[in-house]
Amino acid sequence: MAKILIVYWSGTGNTERMAELITGGAKAKGAEVDCKRIGESGVGEALGYDVVAIGSPSMGQEVIEESEVEPFVEELNGKIAGRKFAIFGSYGWGDGEWMRVWAERMRSYGADLLDDGLTVNESPQGDGETLCREWGEKLAAF
């Protein structure tokens, strides 16, 4: 079974809640999962995992968080060809352009992405909770 790192940044708690639910779904399928805030893990540590899932809310003009997530993602460039990654995050407005741009960027770095990313509008509740758990199960099988 895969050893997974889920690393995220959360301002309001929505992306953090997604990370918790995703972790629960992956663990339910038998994966070994570490879930950390992005400041608690560096790229060097992340590259020691079989799969890395990165979470960021949509910020400003539909971009990933700029002070911690952006530098982490930029540092991956040139280091992740063929490695398994997944991306997720919450948003409050827009149409998800930030996630599409982020997925395209990760693929341009050579990442093997799970899918085009998981997004939840605002806080994951009801169907959003189910989506996060199911995505965690999918992550465990990746």
Image: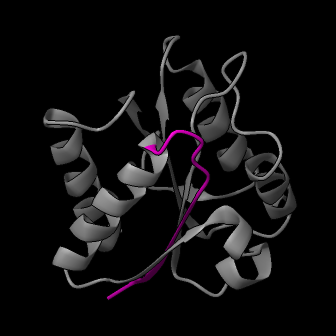
- Image quadrant for the N terminus? bottom left
> Quadrant of the rendered structure where residue 101 is?
top right
Relative vertical location of residue 77 with respect to residue 100 in this rendering, above or below: below
Of residues 11 and 29, which is closer to you in this image? 11
Q: Residue at x 80, y 39 (%)?
A: 66
> Quadrant of the rendered structure where residue 76 is?
bottom right
Counting every numbered tag in the picture gives 0
Whole-percent x and y of residue 50? Answer: 52, 81
Left or right of 133, for residue 41 = right
Relative vertical location of residue 101 with respect to residue 13 in this rendering, above or below: above
Q: Residue at x 43, y 41 (%)?
A: 14
> Quadrant of the rendered structure where residue 48 is?
bottom right
Whole-percent x and y of residue 60? Answer: 72, 20
Outermost residue, front side: 12
Whole-percent x and y of residue 98? Answer: 62, 26
Whole-percent x and y of residue 97? Answer: 58, 19
Q: Start and end of the magenta stretch? A: 1-13
Q: Residue at x 35, y 62 (%)?
A: 20
Of residues 78 and 132, which is closer to you in this image? 132
Relative vertical location of residue 20 with respect to residue 16 in this rendering, above or below: below
Asked if residue 14 lies in the magenta stretch, the reply is no
Relative vertical location of residue 105 with respect to residue 77 in this rendering, above or below: above
Q: Residue at x 70, y 28 (%)?
A: 63
Asked if residue 12 lies in the magenta stretch, the reply is yes
